[in-house]
Amino acid sequence: MARPDRLPSLWNHPSGAAARALWGRRVVILVLAVLLVVGVALLVGKAAGYGTVVDSLRQAAPAWLSICFGGEVVAYAGYVVAFRGVARFRGGPVFGVRTAVEVVFGSLGATRLLAAGGAGGLAFDYWALRKAGQTRHEAVVRVLALNTLLYAIFGLVAAGAAAWLALSSSGISPAMTVPWLVAVPACAGAAVVLSSRVRETAGVPHEVGRLRRAFSQAVAGVVLVRALVEDRTSRVSPLAGATFYWVGDVACLWGGLRAFGVEASAPEIVLAYATGYVATLLPLPTGVGGVDAAMTFALTAVGVPLAPALLGVVAYRLFSFWLPTLPAIALIPSLRRLEHDLEAASPDS
């Protein structure tokens, strides 16, 4: 994690030659990301046949793209609600709506420009919580708890879609459904057992090894999620927020697919979405390229033709990945003000 008094490196705001060099790095990263996505799209397009892709483009119904935009509005609003709910639980910092929105988009920008697998976003969230008065242990645990909550709902919904398709006469390959039906219950069972045995989230002594500390903090994050779910007065907004985050994002993919004439059932879209989304955890620069290809081919595995699947995913990624990056980058000049807002959200302020 980043030091609490410093932003992740690309998010620092120097001046003069250092600022020009830093902006140059940001531009280079974005250009490379765009080139990578274009390269992946061209390769997949070649496999589909460029003529078929062009025909699908000509038959497109752009009005469906409004669903993409609306879905992402719902998704990011849900994320803000989930972040605020987890942050303030059990005496944590109370963030105003504007501050929470800025943190979410700052985290989004860090994920885009800093690291794969969401590491940059985790570091930004950690920095925000530290600035809001949390100890190192508390900040790490809340970041892990937020992501545990999000991915718990993600896994349960994906496993539900896999179960529906496995029990129906859908013809979906077991290779698509069985991993979800095995992995999600196994992870849920492990989380229940661990959180039953460990009911406190006290800090970890500094003298213990890094692996032991990381494991203890991960368990503490699970424990915090369980406590949140069991707390009737505090669970509604984080659970609802996390749910709407995924609902909005899946709706964005659905809108992109409908724009190119794809008609697939909700369980099929959810399963393909979840399978492709797992690619965000792979060590790819800025998390691009692999997701586009993985989600496209996951859609073909549930019966969607390759050309409209590719175009639908491109539309989805435009609204879910590229357009939200613009306000994230625009936030950079106001980060110093955000620091003061975060400090004001501390329970001790």
Image: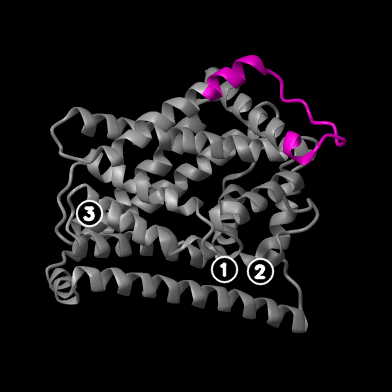
Can residue 159 be seen here? The reply is yes
Can residue 102 be seen here? The reply is no
Report the amino acid beneath label 1: Ala
Q: Is residue 261 above or below residue 332?
A: above
**Residue name at image x 29 percent, y 41 percent:** 176
Spot the residue most to the top: 197
Cα–Cα gap, marks 1 and 3:
37 Å
Mark 1, secondary structure of its residue: helix
Residue 154, x across and y down, in percent: 42, 37
- Checking the image for residue 122, the label placed there is none
User: Closer to the camera, 196 or 333?
Assistant: 196
The span picked out in magenta is 190-213
- For mark 2, what is the residue? 333
- For mark 3, what is the residue? 300
Mark 2, secondary structure of its residue: helix
- Mark 3: few, some, or many residues within 10 Å (few <14, many ≥20)? some
Q: Name the quadrant containing residue 53.
A: bottom left
* Cβ–Cβ under 8 Å for marks 2 and 3: no
- Mark 1: few, some, or many residues within 10 Å (few <14, many ≥20)? few
User: Closer to the camera, 38 or 101?
Assistant: 38
- For mark 1, what is the residue? 330
**Residue name at image x 15 percent, y 68 percent:** 56
Say which quadrant the C terminus sits in.
top right
**Residue name at image x 78 percent, y 58 percent:** 6
